[in-house]
Image (cartoon, rainbow, N blue to C red):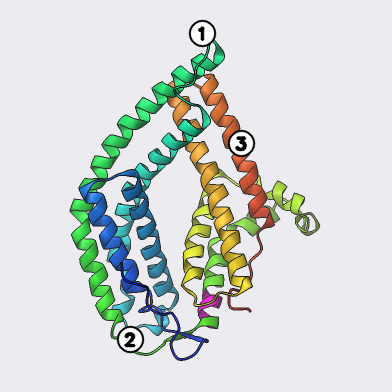
Amino acid sequence: MSKPRPLLVSSPTIIRFPMNTFPDRVAALNGAISTCTAKPTVVAVQGLRKAVRQVEAQLTLLDLIRDRLPHRAAQSREAWLLLKKVRGAAGTVRDLDVQGDLIHKDTSIKSNARLGSQNDNKRGETKHLHRQLAKRREAKALRLVRVLAQNGHSLAVALQSLQQALEEVKEPIISVTELASRIGNWFGANTIHLPQRIAARRTHAELESRAGRERAISLLEMHELHNLRKTAKLCRYLVQVLPISSKTTQKLIKQLRAIQKTGGKWHDWFLLAEIATRHEGKKSSLTERYVQLRDNARINYIQKLASFSWVDPAKA
């Protein structure tokens, strides 16, 4: 892939987004689709999912500067809809890949254990669950290839049309400071339910301490915690578009990545515990093990959320 275009134009305070990043992200996505269509390996699916997320970040940024764009360049609805289909199909396969990897890392299928012992029973349950996931992965990978075959060309056309419209934007259209501010407002708008929900249950004084914030965040529903993780991931991609390498920016990216990582681990164990419950039963030793790992991962995730504080990425 060609080297990314320089982010800065004539001044360190002006950014020529979107044309400094959009073409490269689209090219990467087209390449990932071709690779995954040919053979949906673990690496190929991971690359496709990442490429989709990065293009979604580009479209999110376009939405944030819609008022600065020509009408045609602001029309991204078709691309959004097609990306959603691809992301959903790729995400299902990627989740199964991660779950299979977690099973291997937690309990070795080839480990020696006394016949009839608890470890032997767990090994049997693990092997059975692994076979079920492998079958499901094979079926979902075939579905992913079909989704790419049905939507890949239309997605490429939609993104090419959008790119051509953006190429008409010849001058820098937004300052780094303003774009950073809009990203911050977007993050606040997409996480507003967090302070609203916890404020209804805790006093302001309680929320000033990290322990108080952890107790409050622990009251959030599963889907709310899941959405916070996805928001942090997308926001990291948004911030990385900014042509800034200050300590403040790096701190923010590091915090967002930590939320994404710990939240992802919690969500993976959550799904795996659900799958184990369906296939092995609620009282199986394997299910109990995964529930324990899920709960431990949730605690780590909540701790990261409680320690997070937004910093302006445009500050030095």
* 21 is higher (above) or lower (below) than 296: below
* Mark whose residue sits in front, 3 or 1: 1
Please determine whether, in this image, residue 209 is positioned above or below residue 104: below
Q: Nearer the viewer, residue 259 or 107?
A: 107
Tell whether label 1 touches label 3 (CB within 8 Å). Answer: no
Q: How far is mark 3 from mark 1, CA to CA?
A: 28 Å
Residue, x 32% and y 33% (percent of image)? 136
In the picture, measured across the screen, residue 84 lies left or right of residue 224, that is left
Pointer 2 local density, CA inside 10 Å: few below 14, some 14–19, many at least 20: some
Classify mark 1: helix, strand or loop: loop
Could you tell me residue 92's position as x and y percent? 36, 43
Write the start and end of the magenta stretch as one range.
178-182
Residue that label 1 marks: 116
What is the CA distance from the residue labelled 2 to the residue labelled 3? Answer: 50 Å
Q: Identify the residue under disc 2.
A: 169
Q: Is 18 displayed left or right of 228 in the figure? A: left
